[in-house]
């Protein structure tokens, strides 16, 4: 998978980051969600055990391409 960096809203070079892949998908780097209630809600909606969710600011999505 080839990643192309699209942008960040971080001032210090850390997360969050948004990347586009050569497979027609995006990779998001963000803060892992560890809140038990939020994870339970995600599991109820079908999040499998082998996946996780990350939180990003809305402003990061300005770098997404149509």
Image (cartoon, rainbow, N blue to C red):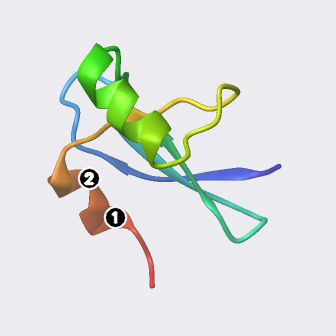
How would you rate the neighbour count of disc 2 (Cα within 10 Å): few for under 14, some for 14-19, many for 20 or more? some
Number of callouts in the render?
2
Q: Position of residue 59 (x, y in %)?
A: 16, 55
Q: Position of residue 7 (x, y in %)?
A: 37, 51
Q: Which numbered tag is attached to residue 63?
A: 1
Q: Which numbered tag is attached to residue 60?
A: 2
35 and 62: which is toward the camera: 35
Q: Is residue 52 above or below residue 2?
A: above
Q: Which numbered tag is attached to residue 21?
A: none
Q: Position of residue 42 (x, y in %)?
A: 41, 39
Q: Residue at x 29, y 61 (%)?
A: 61
The extreme bottom residue here reads 66
Element under disc 1: helix
Check contact, mark 1 vs mark 2: CB within 8 A. yes
Q: Residue at x 34, y 14 (%)?
A: 34
Q: Is residue 23 above or below residue 17?
A: below
54 and 14: which is toward the camera: 54
Classify the position of the C terminus by image quarter.
Answer: bottom left
The extreme front residue here reads 44
Q: Residue at x 70, y 71 (%)?
A: 24
Q: Position of residue 64 (x, y in %)?
A: 40, 68
**Residue 16, picture quadrant:** top left
Query: Horizontal placement of 49 versus 15: left or right?
Result: right
Q: Is residue 29 visible?
A: no
């Amino acid at each position: 998978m080839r990643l192309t960096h699209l942008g960040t809203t971080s001032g210090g070079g850390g997360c969050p980051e948004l990347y586009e892949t050569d497979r027609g998908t995006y990779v998001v780097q963000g803060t892992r969600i560890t809140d038990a209630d939020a994870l339970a809600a995600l599991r109820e909606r079908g999040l499998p055990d082998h996946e996780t969710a990350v939180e990003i600011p809305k402003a990061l999505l300005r770098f997404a391409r149509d």
